[in-house]
Image (cartoon, rainbow, N blue to C red):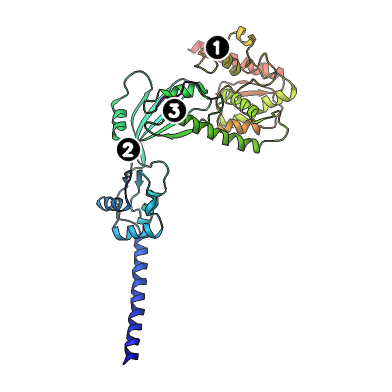
Amino acid sequence: MWRHIASNAFTFLIVGLFLVAGVVAWGTRQYSAAGPLEAAICFEVPGGGTMSRVTADLVDQGAISSAFIFEVGADYTEKSGLLKQGRFRVPEAASMEEIVDIITRGGRNTCGAEVIYRVGINRTIVDVRELDPATNEFVELAGFVVSDEEPPAAYQEVKADGGATFRVVIAEGATSWQTMTALSQIDILQADVTEPPAEGSLAPRDYEISDGETVSSILTRMQEAQAVILDEAWDNRANGLPLETPEEALILASIIEKETSIRDERRQVASVFVNRLNRGMRLQTDPTVIYGITQGEGVLGRGLRQSELRGATPWNTYVIEGLPPTPIANPGQAAIEAALNPDTTDYIFFVADGTGGHAFATNLEDHNSNVAVWRQIEAERANDG
């Protein structure tokens, strides 16, 4: 009899194991299968939110079919404790597995309102926009220039909402003074800096910022980023460059940055300056003269005078030999890499060609011809204007 009971118990155990395995397999398929969302949504994970609360919100919004499977799946993949505060786009038919990944991977918000402060050479433009989750495209809400005037209502509403993402984009070629001043004028930041960082030490790129953050903390992030860029570019530099230190490379990169905004042209411009340095020729570049006049504070706003081209300043490369003592702006990564890996050319001259780019020459005769063409273009534009 006991043998019969043991046999039945073993049978029940086997059946039970098969049932459990079947349930697990079914749950796994449900966890990774397409979800019930018929249209994408913008889902918010609040600060201090728990997986249970988030799960309930997802059920309420019709994003998941089973709270139990969702939480078990998050636990099994060890992501329950990795919730990230923010607003995230959940696409239509997203599986529970995909949703768990979306709300735990971190990074920039992928949904909701976004305010972008674009710091340029002359002004700061603010773009206010909101992502439409259905189309995954941004809808522009407002755009304005930072000034003493009251910002538009849409900007005030987005700020008051408390869930917006804020970013600042620093233009390549902006000086440290321009950058510090522009950041200090952004109303969500605490202006705690009065002296600009060293010229050239800031990486012009895109930074996420937060309401109440200090200007000094953002400048520190920019300096850290620029140091990484410069170190890597220096380690990968070409052989035989007339540059003895990373600091000299940064100076040259800043001149390249101010001479051309065309990415594909930077290495050509770099080759001109490298060739001049190797030949002992003066660099003779106008942006260095302008920096000697403005010290990087503001924009000259007019053409250079002959007296200024002849005037002695530490940055006037029509007068001094070699590189100026400091950078003349904050160069971007492309300009730094161009300075340390220039094209191999025989060019020693260049001048604007009327298209936004430059005409290059290996000798003075050809250069003078290119200059004559440019002067004609200038004259025609003046007449048209």
Q: Residue 26 falls in which quadrant of the image?
A: bottom left
Residue type of the residue flagged with mark 2: Gly
- Number of numbered discs: 3
User: Looking at the image, can residue 232 be seen?
Assistant: yes
Q: Which residue is mark 1?
A: 303
Main SS of residues in magenta: loop
Instruction: Tell me, yes or no, whether the two marked residues, 1 and 3, touch with CB atoms within 8 Å.
Output: no
Q: Amino acid at mark 3?
A: Val
Coordinates of residue 46 in the picture (x, y in percent): 31, 44
Q: Position of residue 261 (x, y in %)?
A: 55, 26
Amino acid type of the residue tagged 1 in the rendering: Gly
Q: Are marks 2 and 1 in contact (CB under 8 Å)?
A: no
Residue furthest to the top in view is: 307
Q: Which mark is residue 340?
A: none
- Who's the residue at 39% across and 34% down the image? 210
Residue range of the region highlighted in magenta in the rendering: 190-195
Q: Secondary structure at mark 1?
A: loop
In this rendering, is residue 243 above or below 317?
below
Q: Decide: few, some or many residues near mark 3? Use Cα within 10 Å; few <14, some 14-19, many ≥20.
A: many
Disc on the earlier residue, 3 or 2: 2
Which residue is tagged 2?
Answer: 163
- The residue that mark 3 highlights is 215
Q: Nearer the viewer, residue 236 or 36?
A: 236
Residue pictured at 34% horizontal, 60% vertical = 72
- Mark 1 or 3: in front is 3
Q: Is 364 situated left or right of 332 in this image?
A: right
CA gap between label 2 and label 1 equals 46 Å
Q: Position of residue 329 (x, y in %)?
A: 55, 23
Q: Depth check: 246 or 95 in front?
A: 246
